[in-house]
Amino acid sequence: MRMFIRYFFRTLRLILTPFMLLSEKLTTPKPVQRPPEEQQAVDVACSQLALYQFRTCPFCIKVRKEIARLGLTIEIRDAQFDGEHRQALEQGGGRIKVPCLLIEQDNGAPQWLYESSDINAWLRARFEPQPLSSAG
């Protein structure tokens, strides 16, 4: 029975994978537009970030869409099929759970941030463009 359940879910994943990836492609928002110097500063800040993820994980898709919306160039690390990234996630973060955002602090210390909602909130707080206030 256990074997049947395992194969059932593997088959279901195989069937749903193309639809999930297509849905991500079709529903990913356009990136925000920043002035070139501001975008350059954002790109430099993003060089200290890496997202550990599984390609078809719905929560990882949610984070990748937010990264795209904010126009961020964050390194994506596949912890599902890349043994090196999987091992780094387990050793550094303490567990193999995705999505996980690795944040290299200015002092070089790593911070491992789990949970898609927490990651998206952190990204918005750090990179959401502030609306121009109109002086009245």
Image (spheres, grey):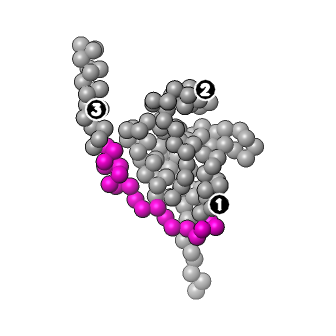
Identify the residue at horizontal 50%, vertical 58% (top origin): 70
Query: How far apart, in angstroms, are the residues tagged by discs 3 and 2?
Result: 29 Å
Is 21 contained in the magenta span? Answer: yes
- Tag 3's secondary structure? helix
What x and y, as percent, mark residue 66? 46, 53
- Residue holding disc 2: 91
- The magenta segment: 20-38
**Quarter of image, res 111:** top right
Labels 3 and 1: the sequence-earlier one = 3
Q: Are marks 2 and 1 in contact (CB under 8 Å)?
A: no
Q: Quadrant of residue 11?
A: top left
Does 118 sit above or below residue 79?
below
Give x and y (percent) for residue 114: 53, 38
Question: Residue at (55%, 45%) from the top-left corner?
Answer: 75
* Residue where numbered disc 1 is placed: 41
Name the secondary structure under disc 2: helix
